[in-house]
Image (cartoon, rainbow, N blue to C red):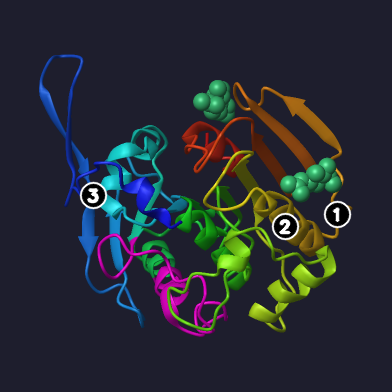
């Protein structure tokens, strides 16, 4: 099974224009999602959309948001509430988009899985650098989040460009490197089917080999997964936890377990300051984005 089930009747919106009524009852034009054409090195031809709120902070944080397969930047922008938070808190939002409408992110090729190796990950890193430069952004407050294919890409970006991101929050993805096939936008059925297992040490060395020689910190990571996911097997949760436990040197055993957190039918496992997993009871593919929880994890709200 692929991600097409996620497409459920969502029309792609190209350039979403939002308006709001002020307290005086006047129509106030809000910022809109706009495409940026030339944002730097972009070997796979992915597309950049940006949302810059009118009350931008002087050194704004930057949040990169990544859609699922069968979605677009515009459709995901329209169904997520991040722009409302950006309006309130003055940070910049980037919505990335795959080269052809509805395509999955490339989380499988040798290029994308290598620091400065090319592919979609390179283009996404260029978007982040462009936004930091253009808006005098705070390079210590750059974050990445996404659903499904965008969740896989969240883990890939954290592993391949750990120097760029302070934290990631992903909703129903796979560990970085799990989908590797050597082909662009490949489908790794062994990974998706939950048959690919590694120890924490093996996963950590897979991550380190994506950026050899890097000795800095890796982004804090928050992993959501549903316990009846039929698209990306539930083993993905444990494999992702093992991967980041290996990277952070954690035991992989939760230090703290909190039921009904952040919401009903969710259990939060805290493995250390830099890693938490949220297990969705009765959730299939996907556990829906919780903007409040992701932005709290990022320290932005
Ligand atoms: C995940 O790991 C936990 C703790 O080690 C274990 O109890 C559970 O059965 C594992 N889940 C899956 C789906 O393998
Ligand atoms: C989302 O997270 C917030 C806390 O960050 C929580 O209050 C809320 O209940 C969560 N929503 C759902 C649907 O789980």
Indicate left or right for 29 with 113 as reference. Answer: left
Residue 33: give its label.
3
Residue range of the region highlighted in magenta in the rendering: 97-126
Give the main secondary structure of the magenta stretch. Answer: loop
Residue 250: give its label.
1
Q: Does the CB distance between marks 2 and 3 fall below 8 Å?
A: no
Instruction: Give the distance between the C-alpha atoms of the residues marked 2 and 1, in whole angstroms.
Output: 14 Å
Would residue 273 be visible to someone looking at this image?
Answer: no
Q: Position of residue 263 (x, y in %)?
A: 59, 24
Q: Residue at x 85, y 60 (%)?
A: 249
Quadrant in which residue 104 is drawn = bottom left
Q: Position of residue 192 (x, y in %)?
A: 58, 60
Residue furthest toward the left? Answer: 26
Residue 239: give its label.
2
State whether residue 173 is above or below residue 31.
below
Instruction: Give the distance between the C-alpha atoms of the residues marked 2 and 3, in whole angstroms.
Output: 35 Å
Which of 45 and 36 lies nearest the eye of the viewer? 45
Label 2 SS: helix
Q: Position of residue 49 (x, y in %)?
A: 28, 58
Label 3 SS: loop
State whether label 2 is within 8 Å of ligand 1. no
Q: Residues within 10 Å of mark 1 (few under 14, many from 20)?
A: some
Q: Position of residue 129 (x, y in %)?
A: 43, 69
Q: Residue at x 34, y 44 (%)?
A: 56
Nearer the N terminus, badge 3 or badge 1? 3
Q: Residues within 10 Å of mark 3 (few under 14, many from 20)?
A: many
Task: Tell me if residue 115 is in the magenta stretch.
Answer: yes
Indicate left or right for 39 with 113 as reference. Answer: left
Q: Which quadrant of the picture is home to ligand 2?
A: top right
Q: Residue at x 47, y 38 (%)?
A: 289
């Amino acid at each position: 099974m692929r991600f097409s089930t996620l497409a459920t009747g969502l029309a792609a919106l190209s350039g979403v224009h939002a308006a709001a009524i002020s307290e005086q009852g006047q129509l106030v034009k809000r910022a809109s999602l706009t495409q940026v054409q030339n944002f730097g090195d972009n070997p796979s031809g992915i597309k950049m959309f940006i949302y810059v709120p009118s009350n931008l902070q002087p050194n704004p944080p930057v949040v990169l948001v990544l859609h699922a397969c069968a979605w677009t930047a515009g459709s995901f922008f329209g169904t997520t509430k991040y722009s409302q938070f950006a309006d309130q808190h003055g940070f910049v939002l980037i919505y990335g988009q795959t080269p052809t409408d509805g395509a999955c992110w490339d989380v499988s090729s040798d290029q994308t899985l290598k620091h400065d190796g090319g592919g979609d990950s390179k283009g996404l890193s260029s978007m982040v650098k462009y936004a930091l430069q253009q808006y005098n952004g705070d390079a210590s407050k750059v974050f990445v989040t996404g659903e499904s294919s965008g969740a896989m890409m969240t883990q890939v970006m954290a592993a391949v460009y750990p120097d760029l991101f302070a934290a990631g929050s992903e909703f129903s993805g796979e560990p970085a490197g799990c989908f590797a096939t050597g082909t662009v936008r490949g489908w790794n059925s062994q990974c998706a089917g939950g048959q690919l297992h590694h120890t924490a040490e093996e996963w950590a060395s897979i991550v380190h080999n994506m950026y050899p020689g890097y000795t800095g910190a890796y982004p804090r990571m928050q992993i959501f997964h549903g316990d009846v996911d039929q698209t990306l097997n539930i083993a993905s949760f444990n494999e992702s936890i093992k991967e980041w436990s290996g990277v952070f040197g954690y035991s992989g055993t939760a230090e703290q377990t909190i039921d009904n957190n952040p919401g009903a039918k969710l259990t939060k496992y805290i493995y250390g300051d830099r890693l938490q997993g949220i297990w969705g009871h009765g959730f299939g593919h996907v556990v829906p984005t919780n903007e409040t929880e992701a932005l709290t994890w990022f320290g932005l709200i």
